[in-house]
Amino acid sequence: MQGMKEKFTISLTDEGVEISNNEGVSLSFTALEALMVLDILQEEEPNLRRMADAVSPLPMRIRFTKEE
């Protein structure tokens, strides 16, 4: 099994958020645009989890939570 490798970097900027890959391709979002994307992803989270679980080679699940 291959180790995990970083495929992209997410950076908070003064204007919003930038997502870039190792090949120099990047997407920039204003703060408002980033919040809209976040809202969509949160709504789709159950579907995304089901899809990820279906293709996961791992017998265990890793879950990251944010501390408040």
Image (cartoon, rainbow, N blue to C red):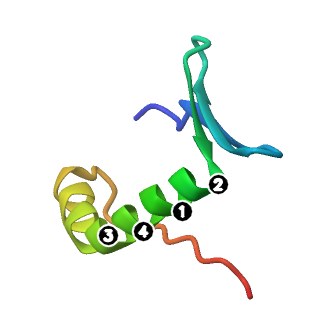
Image depth: mark 2 or mark 3 in front? 2
Q: Amino acid at mark 3?
A: Glu
Q: Which residue is mark 2?
A: 31
Per the rendering, the mark at residue 57 is none
The residue pinned by badge 3 equals 45
Could you classify mark 3 by the number of other residues whose Cα lies within 10 Å: few (under 14), some (14-19), or many (20 or more)? few
| Closest to the observer, 5 or 45 | 45
Q: Could you give the CA–CA distance between mark 4 and mark 1, rounded to whole angstroms?
A: 6 Å
Residue behind mark 1:
35
Examine the rendered structure and indicate whether residue 46 appears above or below residue 56: below
Pointer 3 or 4: first along the chain: 4
- The residue tagged 4 is 39
Count the marks.
4
Amino acid on which the number 4 mark rests in the picture? Asp
Q: Secondary structure at mark 3?
A: helix
Classify 10 Å Cα crowding around label 1: few (below 14), some (14-19), many (20 and above). some
Residue 29 seen in the current view = yes
